[in-house]
Amino acid sequence: MTETNIPQQKLSSETTVNSGDVELAVTAYGEPHNPTIILIHGYPDSSPVWDPVVDILQHHFHVVTYDVRGCGRSTEPAWMWDYSLNKLSEDLQAVMRAVCPTQPVHLLAHDWGSIQTWESVTDHRMKPRIASYTSISGPCLDHIGLWIRNNMASGKMKALAEVAGQAASSWSVYAFQLPFLAPSAWKMGLDKAWPGILKRMEGQEVEENPTQRRDGVNGINLYRANIIPRVSNPRLRQTDVPVQLLVPTKDKFVTPAMVESCYPYAQNIWRRDVDASHWVVKSHAEWVANCVSEFVEFVESGRESPNLAKARVNQES
């Protein structure tokens, strides 16, 4: 397990990685000879959201963060469709080649970072490059589409109620499809109000993000380029990569059914629940870092701790 009483110290190096016509701002921490963990942030965040987790992990691992296209210090593409899952997977592959060109890497992702990372984890061509995947509050859109299709086809009231409940939880999905309302909200002051909104919703103090307006506006394209195409026409996406699900049980945006939608399609799953809300990467950074450390050490060594063994999902039951 990670030792958390080590004095906080950030030793980092910054670089720019080209992915097509986009330049990605990448920061690496720790020693390159240690196992590499790449962290992918969600919406409407940028890579500094990971700082509390990085502060812990960097002492034992080579930790890499990057601003996804259109966010933070990364450049933005020209078209909405350039935010497709395929393009986002290409970005991750470019970062992999730059920071760890020969060895498999471990992935940790949150929110939209997790949604987009499923695209790579379920791509059989990338299997040799991915050692493990820890997903927080971000399901695979294809799995969600298949889950909705199967529940609707069953006609059972319980299943239909689950679909309706998920629709009610996903209000942001519908709001961000509106062509003018969502970008205008960020431009008219939502960026300044965002820390206060998070404090009321999550009970957390959040530092002001200098690129929040840009992150909010550009990130809307993630919804528009991917939600309807993938959920309405889902593909069969499977993986045998070791997958760890970290589940904040008070998440207002991702229901348990969404988390569990991957069960039929991932062969090796571990799940850990925590009494926390959506932005668990900030509120419970030590817990997240410890879970990831234990999982990575298991995948690297083959030695499974008793706590991790208890977290295995028995998919035959």
Image (tube, rainbow, N blue to C red):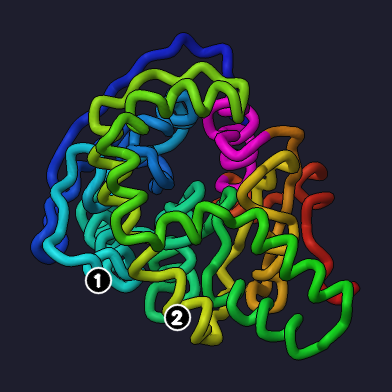
Does 282 lie within the magenta span? yes
Point out the tag, 2 or 1, that comes first from the N-terminus. 1
Question: Residue at coordinates 23% horizontally, 53% vertically from top-left?
Answer: 69
Residue 81: numbered disc: 1
Q: Foreground: 56 or 81?
A: 81
Query: Residue 11, image x and y in percent?
Result: 29, 22
Question: Residue at coordinates 18% horizontally, 49% vertically from top-left?
Answer: 24
Residue 191 in view here: yes
Query: Which quadrant holds residue 264?
Result: bottom right
Task: In the rendered view, tell whether residue 185 sits above or below residue 92.
Answer: above
Query: Which quadrant holds residue 294?
Result: top right
Query: Which quadrant holds residue 256?
Result: bottom right
- State whether the magenta stretch is mostly helix, strand or loop: helix
Q: Tell me if label 2 and label 1 are in contact, CB under 8 Å.
A: no
Quarter containing the N terminus: top right
- The single residue placed furthest to the bottom in the displayed view is 153
Judge left or right: residue 232 versus residue 155: left
Mark 2, residues whose alpha carbon is within 10 Å: few (<14), some, or many (≥20)? few
Does 66 lie within the magenta span? no
Query: Residue 110, image x and y in percent?
Result: 50, 47
Point out the stretch of residues depicted in magenta.
277-296
Query: Residue 259, image x and y in percent?
Result: 67, 60
Q: Amino acid at mark 2?
A: His
Residue 124: numbered disc: 2
